Image: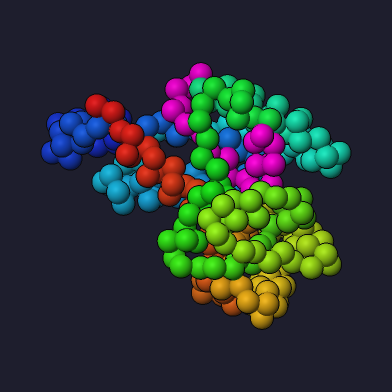
């Protein structure tokens, strides 16, 4: 697309002339972990950015990813400081590329943020805080949690939800293991099976009986198989909610 502006419209085109005078959204940095979740976050920024900014338009986005194997090596040995070092390495590269702030479309590795934030070159949006704020806006009171077994046993969501006056219910131990297997053996590899959908429906339905009024899709791959049309509870899609929060921040912070 030769002779194009930064917004994708040909120079001299009326759309180009109009958009060249618009403030430029902030540059979003994505600290990626697993490919499927990061790709969904990136696609959401681009497609929903166009709905807000005009045809083909979205904020500048830079994504950096270490090998997922590097993250998993740390996670399997419970080395969250090691996870944090990987995140910081990405953060520094994204800062050097010109990003204004960072998002991480991976719930589990948010456990490392306490090590990351004091040394980070850029501010972060916290995925669980974004989800908690959206739950309050929608009027929910008690959320079912789904995600990897490392996320479920962590305080990432309980703390963020409690800060907003919200309660949560975690899957039972056996449910955690099967959900974790589905995520790690299937979803992160781009494998989506009807049996996995059925299992999530079963677990979510049980937590609905315990009084939950919505479910957190707390692994960024879960929205690839679960949504409001097939879930027994309304869903809080952590991946897309984070992407939308990033869009909002980028546009509100737009510079001339």
- Regarding residue 4, the answer to whether it shows in the image is no
Residue 93, compared with residue 159, is above or below; it is: above
The image's colouring method is rainbow
Residue 150 percent location from the top left of the image: 76, 50
Q: Residue furthest right?
A: 77
Q: Is residue 106 left or right of residue 242?
A: right
Residue at horizontal 69 percent and vertical 57 percent from the top: 147
Q: Is residue 133 left or right of residue 225?
A: left
Quarter of image, res 98: top left
Residue 95 percent location from the top left of the image: 51, 22
Residue at horizontal 32 percent and vertical 47 percent from the top: 50
Q: Is residue 116 left or right of residue 180?
A: left
Residue 173 percent location from the top left of the image: 83, 64
Residue at horizontal 54 percent and vertical 49 percent from the top: 129
Is residue 126 inside the magenta stretch?
A: no
Q: Residue furthest bottom?
A: 209
Q: Quarter holding the N terminus?
A: top left
Is residue 106 inside the magenta stretch?
A: yes
Quarter of image, res 91: top right
Residue 151 percent location from the top left of the image: 72, 51
Residue 154, compared with residue 168, is above or below; it is: above
Nearer-the-camera pick, 130 or 37: 130
Q: Quarter holding the C terminus?
A: top left
Q: How many marks?
A: 0
Residue 151, compared with residue 33, is above or below; it is: below
Residue at horizontal 55 percent and vertical 59 percent from the top: 165
Q: Give the extent of the magenta segment.
A: 96-114
- Regarding residue 164, the answer to whether it shows in the image is yes
Nearer-the-camera pick, 133 or 165: 165
């Amino acid at each position: 697309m030769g002779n194009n502006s930064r917004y994708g419209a040909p120079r001299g085109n009326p759309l180009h002339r109009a958009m060249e005078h618009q403030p430029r959204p902030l540059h979003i940095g994505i600290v990626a972990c697993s490919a499927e979740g990061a790709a969904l976050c990136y696609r959401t920024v681009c497609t929903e950015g166009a709905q807000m900014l005009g045809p083909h338009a979205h904020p500048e986005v830079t994504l950096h990813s270490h090998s997922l194997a590097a993250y998993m090596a740390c996670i399997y040995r419970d080395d969250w400081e090691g996870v944090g070092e990987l995140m910081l390495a990405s953060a520094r590269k994204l800062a050097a590329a010109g990003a204004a702030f960072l998002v991480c479309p991976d719930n589990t590795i948010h456990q490392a943020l306490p090590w990351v934030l004091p040394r980070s070159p850029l501010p972060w949006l916290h995925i669980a805080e974004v989800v908690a704020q959206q739950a309050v806006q929608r009027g929910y009171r008690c959320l079912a949690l789904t995600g990897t077994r490392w996320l479920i046993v962590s305080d990432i969501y309980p703390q963020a939800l409690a800060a907003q006056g919200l309660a949560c219910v975690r899957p039972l131990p056996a449910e955690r293991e099967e959900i974790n297997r589905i995520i790690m053996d299937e979803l992160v590899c781009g494998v989506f099976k009807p049996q996995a959908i059925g299992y999530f429906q079963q677990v979510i339905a049980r937590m609905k009986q315990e009084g939950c009024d919505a479910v957190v899709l707390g692994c960024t791959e879960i929205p690839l198989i679960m949504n409001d049309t097939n879930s027994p509870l309304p869903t809080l899609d952590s991946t897309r909610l984070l992407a939308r929060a990033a869009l909002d921040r980028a546009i509100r912070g737009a510079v001339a």
